[in-house]
Image (cartoon, rainbow, N blue to C red):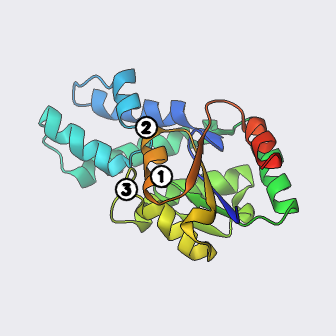
Amino acid sequence: MKAVIFDLDGVLVDSEPAQGKASRDLFARYGKKYTERHEQEFLGVRAREEIAILKRRWKLAPTIEVLMAQRRQILGRLINQVELMSGAVELLQWLAEINLPLGLGTSSEAEYVNRILENLGIKNYFKVIVTGDDVVRGKPDPEVYLKVARGLGVAPKECVVIEDAPNGVAAARAAGMQCWMVTDSLMEVKRWLTNI
């Protein structure tokens, strides 16, 4: 292992409630009910792709650009509610201390990602940051993780990806990377890394 690549939402930051509310509030404007089933279906998927699918499924009139702008506005009001996951800073500090290069590969939009990282003071830990705006195809396509590995100058097989969503795990595996899926505690990730 020569590098660790993190997903953002649900791994480093507890943003799933804000992301879910943004989608619920957006589609409620058009009389559609965005449920927990939708949240699970689109976990780890770029918002643009989620909106495109639901626009077709629900036959919504506004363009994808209009829907994206509305969702962005809603999420912007919720962004200050996003907090770090337990153990996130400790894990990032420890990895920095042992000189493992860190990358971030996320489906989220660059503006949102930069605000989150700056608000929470963790942006400087990452040598390379690739967002949903930087790729043509979102997860489960491996493009985002392959782009991070190239930026780090590390072969995909030498990267470990930390993910929380099946689409992200699929992307990491398609990239030829080792992937660890976490559900609640990044301190557990530190224990795993210590033992390899």
Residue 7 visible in rendering: no
Q: Which disc is residue 141 wearing?
A: 3
Q: Residue at x 22, y 30 (%)?
A: 30
Where disc 1 sits, the SS reads helix
Where disc 3 sits, the SS reads loop
Asked whether 113 or 177 is in front, the reply is 177
x, y (%) of residue 108? 47, 52
The numbered mark, 3 or 2, whose residue comes first in the sequence reads 2
For disc 3, the neighbor class at 10 Å (few under 14, some 14 to 19, many from 20) is many
Gap in angstroms between the C-alphas marked 3 and 2 = 14 Å
Where disc 2 sits, the SS reads loop
The residue that mark 1 highlights is: 173
The residue that mark 2 highlights is: 43
Asked whether 150 or 114 is in front, the reply is 150
The numbered mark, 2 or 1, whose residue comes first in the sequence reads 2
Q: Amino acid at mark 1?
A: Arg
Q: Is 46 placed left or right of 11 in the picture? A: left
Is 21 situated above or below 161? above
Label 1 near label 2: C-beta < 8 Å? no
Q: Amino acid at mark 3?
A: Asp
